[in-house]
Amino acid sequence: MWNREDVPKNEEALHTAEPARMTRPVEERRIVAWVGKSVLFKGDLTSSEDLTIDGRLEGTIQLREHHLTIGPDANIRADIIARSVTILGAVTGTITASDKVDISQTGSLEGNIVAPRLAMADGAVMRGRVDMPARKADASDPRPRLAAVV
């Protein structure tokens, strides 16, 4: 009665099959984290990957080694710390970037910027102070540097 030879092949497959794995297809995976435009976030947001925000956010944003994109429909009221920031929407707060801040023609910033590089497109709006600390000297950078006279 319990002979292996008597077991129908489809029933044998039921007992030996591996459990189904819940994985998303590769084509559905996002390259960056994303906060949608219908989202309202209040608090401290920290990410260890690139991030795009299209919604509203109030609080702080920290992406110390990563890129932050503020989408065209975004309304951000936060202090931001990131490697680089691209602004397509509206930001109110202080931005500290270790590399660059880029404000597009649809972007606006009311607040201060601390970054070694700043790019603003025609039509970009910025109201605040910009502090551009000197970047560390790089031996691979062929541009001449001015020497301090003592």
Image: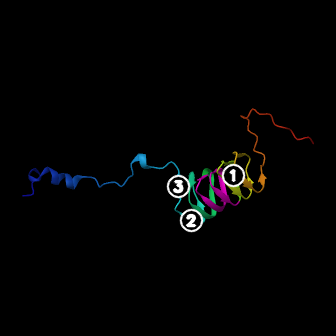
Start-end of magenta stretch: 69-93
In the picture of the structure, the residue carrying the numbered disc 3 is: 34
Instruction: Give the label, 3 or 1, closer to the camera.
Output: 3
Q: Amino acid at mark 1?
A: Ala
Look at the numbered disc 2 and give the secondary structure of its residue. Answer: strand
Image quarter of the C terminus: top right
Give x and y (percent) for residue 15.
21, 55
Mark 3 vs mark 2, CA separation in Å: 12 Å
How many C-alpha atoms fall within 10 Å of the one at disc 1: few (<14), some, or many (≥20)?
A: many
In the picture of the structure, the residue carrying the numbered disc 1 is: 97
Mark 3 vs mark 1, CA separation in Å: 20 Å
> Relative to 109, is 141 above or below?
above
Foreground pick, 144 / 131: 131
Q: Amino acid at mark 3?
A: Trp
Residue 73 lies in what quarter of the image?
A: bottom right
Look at the numbered disc 3 and give the secondary structure of its residue. Answer: strand
How many C-alpha atoms fall within 10 Å of the one at disc 3: few (<14), some, or many (≥20)?
A: some
Look at the numbered disc 1 and give the secondary structure of its residue. Answer: strand
Q: Residue furthest left?
A: 1
User: Which of pointers 1 and 2 lies earlier in the amino acid sequence?
Assistant: 2
Q: Residue furthest bottom?
A: 42
How many C-alpha atoms fall within 10 Å of the one at disc 2: few (<14), some, or many (≥20)?
A: some
In the picture of the structure, the residue carrying the numbered disc 2 is: 41
Foreground pick, 108 / 69: 108
Give x and y (percent) for residue 93.
70, 61
Q: Residue furthest front?
A: 123
Mark 1 vs mark 2, CA separation in Å: 22 Å
Decide whether residue 63 is among the magenta residues.
no
Image quarter of the N terminus: bottom left
